Image (tube, grey):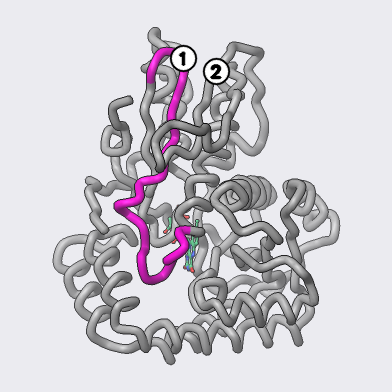
Amino acid sequence: MTAKYNLRVTPWKIRESDFSSMTSFEEKVKFLLKYAVLAPSSHNTQLWKFAIKDERIKVSADLTCALKVADPDERELFISVGCALTNLTIAAKRFGYVPMITYFPEGLDEDLVALIEFSKSEAERNELFESITRRRTNRSLYEDKPISREVLKKLQDCVEAGIRLNFISDTETRVMVAELVAKGDIIQYNNPAYRKELGYWVGQGVFGHKGIAAKIGKFFISHLNAGKSLGQKEKKLIQSAPVFAVLSSAKNDREIWVKIGEVYEKVALTATSLNIQQHPMNQGLTQVPEHREKLREILGIEEIPKLTFRLGYAKPTKHQVRGQLEEVLVPW
Ligand SMILES: Cc1cc2nc3c(=O)[nH]c(=O)nc-3n(C[C@H](O)[C@H](O)[C@H](O)COP(=O)(O)O)c2cc1C
């Protein structure tokens, strides 16, 4: 695992009008990629890579950033790349391109997720595009305010074939899930390798800690077992949220993980456009194999949960840092 970013919050500020001054395809695509890198990723590892040639882009997973302990199957890694693909697609359409995506083309690099060719079309402006620079993971307590059925229906409409989205809004089930997360946090924090890995990323500043604060954060996470207190905190977070959501699938391979990422980002952007906050919460739950199974039983479904998140109303929190675009551009 390596981190390599020059982390800043500035990537969130994009001037749309700059696009019109771009002349070459490469410049234009680089501009679109500024939106792709604002996608969420597990531990904010930003594990995507992009190569540009002629009218094409290769979108790859940066396997050197894989979370070997928290995400040994690389499920979250590919979900995160899927989130970036959704942002890229929406931004491309906004600036007058139709992206033709071939997923996992055979015979090319092992870490290649998608080969995208662009053709020109009418620019298509929509509220999801506006949400790309507004979306953020919100880890605060949410207000005691339900989410209406109409809104949940709009979120449900983001789902694609082969993927299931369950909403848990009754108190009893949310309490069961909260208990599971609290137990899961203890299980994960009892593993020193898990704490070391998380501490490493905190030390790299991916959660916004700088300088000495990042070093202290790394030390505490790596050396102190805070699983129990974190579990109690996360229990309260889940109980404060009117809806806990679960994305599941029967399939369990790279392709479906990317699709789940694409769907999650559509849900998150739609929620953002409706002023609903989101918080992915895989820690303690889908990151613990036996808890994936327990959650499946609680929901009474056949599919295996892959990504879980809270939804609700709250004041938006600050944006999280990102590396600079040049740091994720690689040669073809
Ligand atoms: C697959 C995936 C899993 C995640 N799991 C968690 C989690 O368990 N707990 C958490 O607090 N955030 C989780 N996140 C949120 C990331 O930490 C967050 O996206 C990242 O820090 C960047 O911040 P942003 O979403 O505000 O841009 C997850 C995100 C993704 C894409």
- Residue found 53% across the figure and 58% down from its top: 316
Q: Is residue 302 left or right of residue 229?
A: right
Q: Residue furthest right?
A: 149
**Label 2 near label 1: C-beta < 8 Å?**
yes
Q: For disc 1, does the CB lie below 8 Å from ligand 1?
A: no
Q: Quadrant of the N terminus?
A: bottom left
Q: Is residue 112 magenta?
A: no
> Would you name the residue on which mark 1 appears?
55
> Would you name the residue on which mark 2 appears?
118
**Is 254 placed above or below 86 here?**
below
**In the rendered structure, which disc, 1 or 2, sits on the residue that comes first in sequence?**
1
- Specify few, some or many for label 2: CA neighbours under 10 Å numbering under 14, 14-19, or 20 or more: some
Q: Which residues are magenta?
A: 53-74
- Residue found 72% across the figure and 54% down from its top: 163
- Residue found 22% across the figure and 65% down from its top: 203
Q: Position of residue 147 (x, y in %)?
A: 76, 64
